[in-house]
Amino acid sequence: MADRPAAARRWTILRWLLPATILLALAGYFGPWVGHRVAGLVVMGLDLGEYVKFLTPVRAGQIALWREGFYLPLVVASLSASLIAFRRELRYPWVVRGLLLATAIVAALNLLPPAWTPQRMLTDEFRQQAAALAICLAAMAFSPLLALLPRRLVAVLVAAGALGAAIVPARQFLAVLPTIADLYHQPLTPGWGLWLCAGGLLALAGAALWFGWERE
């Protein structure tokens, strides 16, 4: 009996920690990964999936990249929001559920390339993005059904996805940063967006595991 107030407090913290980490990761993703005093030279995490296609070492195959890996934070944020929105254990009010689903949609739609068309999305270049977009939108649409999945399964899926989304884009970005520095003719360090995105995703992974193993 004496432990119930403490358990309730832990669930209250967890209830708001999960969406907060998703939003932090997205804020970092849309923040500067390459900072510059000239606005036109700032590169966001969102830009990198397209930006790296034009780097000479990448085009020449000297730096091997999985281009779509730069979109993993969007995919994980979208799927995570859909997976937690209707969880019975979290007891979100309807307004929060609506905001989580809106977050899932916004993150998913940012997978679309500039000047996209349906025909362009079916080409080899964008097929993986199209598949990820379809999966994210389907997860959003079936979010109430996904809430029936076992809690620990959801926790492991979110944690594993968040861990991968923190590591893969960061490693690839650090691999191309010297090339970008050569283009700018100045030394560059990673912008705050990278650290906030990676930190938010790692926090999401930790919060997901806490969610999976916290006693009700």
Image (tube, grey):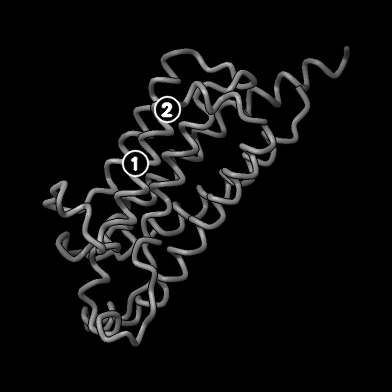
Three-letter amino acid code at the position of disc 1? Ala
Q: Position of residue 215 (x, y in %)?
A: 78, 27
- Could you say which is closer to the camera, residue 177 or residue 97? 97
Residue occupying the point 56% across, 25% down: 147
* Dot 2 alpha-carbon crowd within 10 angstroms: few under 14, some 14 to 19, many 20 or more: many
Identify the amino acid type marked 2.
Leu
Q: In the visual, does 216 lie left or right of 93?
A: right
Q: In terms of sequence position, does the residue under pointer 2 or pointer 1 come before the other? A: 2
x and y percentages locating residue 107 in the rendered image: 34, 41
Q: How far is the residue under mark 2 from the one under mark 1?
A: 18 Å
Q: Which mark is residue 37?
A: none
Q: Give whichever of 41, 159 is nearer the camera.
A: 159
96 shown above or below 17: above
Q: Residue at (54%, 50%) from the top-left corner?
A: 161
Residue depicted at x 14% and y 62%:
40
Which image quarter holds the N terminus?
A: top right
Front-most of 197 and 112? 112
The residue positioned 49% from the left and 35% from the top of the image is: 20
Q: Write down the quadrant of residue 6 in the picture.
A: top right
**Apparent side of residue 155 relative to residue 33 in the rendered image (left or right):** right
Quadrant (top left/top right/bottom left/bottom right) for the C terminus: top right
Residue 178 quadrant: bottom left
Q: Where is residue 140 shown, x and y percent of the image? A: 40, 30
On the picture, is 177 further left or further right than 37? right
- x and y percentages locating residue 151 in the rendered image: 67, 31
Q: Which residue is mark 2?
A: 100
**Residue assigned mark 1:** 134
For numbered disc 1, what is the local secondary structure?
Answer: helix
Q: Residues within 10 Å of mark 1 (few under 14, many from 20)?
A: some
- In the foreground, 62 or 181: 62
